[in-house]
Amino acid sequence: MRMLELAKECEKLLVYTHVSTAYVNCNRRGDIEETVYDLPGGQDPEEVIESIIRMGPQRVQEQEANLIGDWPNTYTYTKSMAERSLKKNHGNLRVAIVRPSIIVSCYDEPCRGWSDTLAAAGGLTWAMQTGLIHYIKTYYDCPFDLIPCDFVTNIIIANTAYTASCPAASLNVAHAATTGKNQFNIRGFTEYVMRSAQEREYIKQIADPSFQATPNDKVFKTKLYLTEKLPTKIMHTVSRVTRNK
């Protein structure tokens, strides 16, 4: 909202572009349209935000599950509230909203495979290839909507340019995702990662790469403890006893 206030003071600004996430409406079922949905019951997003701020950090943490409701986490919830606040307050500004799914390394520009971060799927890919993690709490057929970074930047540019040609006060939403026509899942992702790990072994390999989707919570926690947490604790103990970092 502070960025929006600044944008309103820029007299020659054509478009205000906001990068959101494809998961702002993950509490909904069925097709998700390129629109900003109102809150259930016609709630005012700013009033909801103000009521949360007045609660204070400790109470917010205690009431987190009740506050976010059908959203799976605070990230998707706050992103959705940001969109609704933009819709209410953008005034005469032209606003472009882009909703990317899970961003991965570039497909073509500036070069194939380029990335400068280990965030999101990049961190997961690296951890699997180096043998750092072997189990993930998921199932193989779980949809995994990946979008190359250069596709996302192109959509940001395109939606911004399109919105600049629209009348004042326009609000245009564009998804940057693949699920509808190019479906992908955890099985396909892990097969690619494991194949890449075998063909191009990482120079600082931690362990042999392997992966198993483990949807059962108890089984997942047990495997995680036995294969990762327990060995780490043993290594820490040996390190302290031998004073060897």
Image (tube, rainbow, N blue to C red):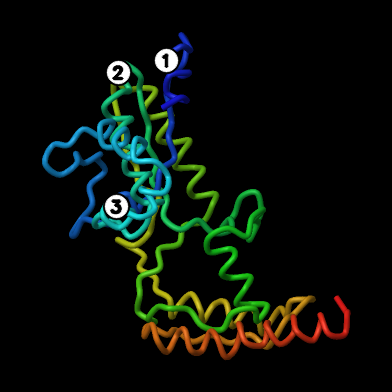
Residue 42 lies in quadrant: top left
Answer yes or no: do the residues labelled 3 and 2 have beta carbons within 8 Å?
no
Answer yes or no: do the residues labelled 1 and 2 have beta carbons within 8 Å?
yes
Identify the amino acid type marked 2: Gly
Considering the image in quadrants, where does the N terminus appear? Answer: top left
- Badge 1 or badge 2: first in the primary sequence: 1
Identify the amino acid type marked 1: Lys
Q: Residue furthest right?
A: 243
Tell me residue 61's x, y (percent): 39, 53
Tell me residue 196's x, y (percent): 63, 78
Residue at coordinates 26% horizontally, 55% vertically from top-left?
66
Residue at coordinates 35% horizontally, 70% vertically from top-left?
143
Q: Which residue is mark 1?
A: 8
As drawn, the label of residue 68 is 3
Mark nearer the viewer, 3 or 1 = 3
Considering the image in quadrants, where does the C terminus appear? Answer: bottom right
Q: Which residue is mark 2?
A: 91
- The correct choice, above or below, for 54 with respect to 204 in the image is above
Q: Mark 2: few, some, or many residues within 10 Å (few <14, many ≥20)?
A: few
